[in-house]
Amino acid sequence: MFELEEVPGTPFDDVVEVSNYIAALERGMARLREGFPLSNRLVREMHAALMSRGRGSDKLPGEFRRSQNWIGGTRPATARFVPSPPQEVEPCMAALERFLHEETGGLPVLLRAALAHVQFETIHPFLDGNGRLGRLLIALVLHQGGLLSQPLLYLSLYFKQHRQMYYDLLDRVRTAGDWEAWLDFFLDGVEQTAHGAVQTARRLIDLFEADNRRVQQTPRAAANALRVLAALRERPVLTLKYLRDAHTMTFPTAAKAMQSLIGMGVARELTGQRRNRVFVYDAYLAILNEGGEPL
């Protein structure tokens, strides 16, 4: 058993967590584009990516929980909320999967996403990472329903800014069936977040264009540095081993190009290790992580 709570971490922990979040989202979106259904199998795959490193990596990544968890308090008896008992997780998630697949009398996609999020958070099927994965589920439902071609709508900041109301409204659905108040809150968040997403996308485009120009102004290092910069846009936290394996670069070439980006202030080395060094695209992560993640 363990209590679900936020645990203060180091800046490296935070970067790894955001990187995992992006990897899980990319995994889910790629699978949907391949024609894979939005299913419990996909949810577990995404959870495995989300919890692959850092905090929570010892909490059964990719597996539904087999013990009781709770939110708030020191034990279930004093908790603010106690999710489904472990023996009910599989049946409850199967019911959620059926809801995501069935035709529900023309229920709008936005409402389907709002209802699915509440149900997922109420089941709390994993030992850790349920809040993050529940928010990723919103993006997947919207993509599957044709409202998002790219995952550019994240409600994390909105939920964080209205944290107490978010928790209160979830509890009111569970205890009083007050779906209307939750839906009003959710749809207001979608509207606000959509406007913010447009601005974020524009800022990211400006950042990528500016950094490309900076690299191109260093002719001797430009070609390979641009390859590494492109890799950092795909994965803003990476290692030289990743560049070797995923982008067919030798260690010396990757290291030299990365050092050029560090010299330009584009990338930063996180770990201080001589081996297995981790590099981060700071400005990219800063834009993605404004407001903080996770909730």
Image (cartoon, rainbow, N blue to C red):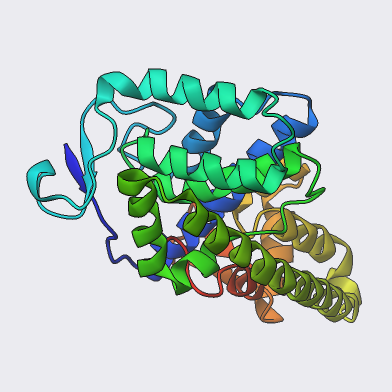
Give the quadrant of residue 113. Answer: top right
* Image position, residue 136 (x, y; %): 57, 47
Residue drawn at x 37%, y 26% as measured from the top left: 64
Residue nearest the viewer, comparing 60 with 110: 110
Residue drawn at x 76%, y 76% as measured from the top left: 199
Specify whether 42 is left or right of 31: left
In the image, residue 22 sits, relative to residue 101, either above or below, namely: below
* Image position, residue 145 (x, y; %): 76, 39
Residue nearest the viewer, comparing 224 with 35: 35
In the image, residue 208 sits, relative to residue 136, either above or below, namely: below
Specify whether 148 is left or right of 77: right
Report the label total: 0
User: Can residue 143 be seen?
Assistant: yes
For the C terminus, the image quarter is: bottom left
In the image, residue 284 sits, relative to residue 18, either above or below, namely: below
* Image position, residue 134 (x, y; %): 49, 45
* Image position, residue 278 (x, y; %): 53, 58
Residue nearest the viewer, comparing 234 with 266: 234
User: Can residue 52 be seen?
Assistant: no
Residue drawn at x 52%, y 58% as measured from the top left: 18
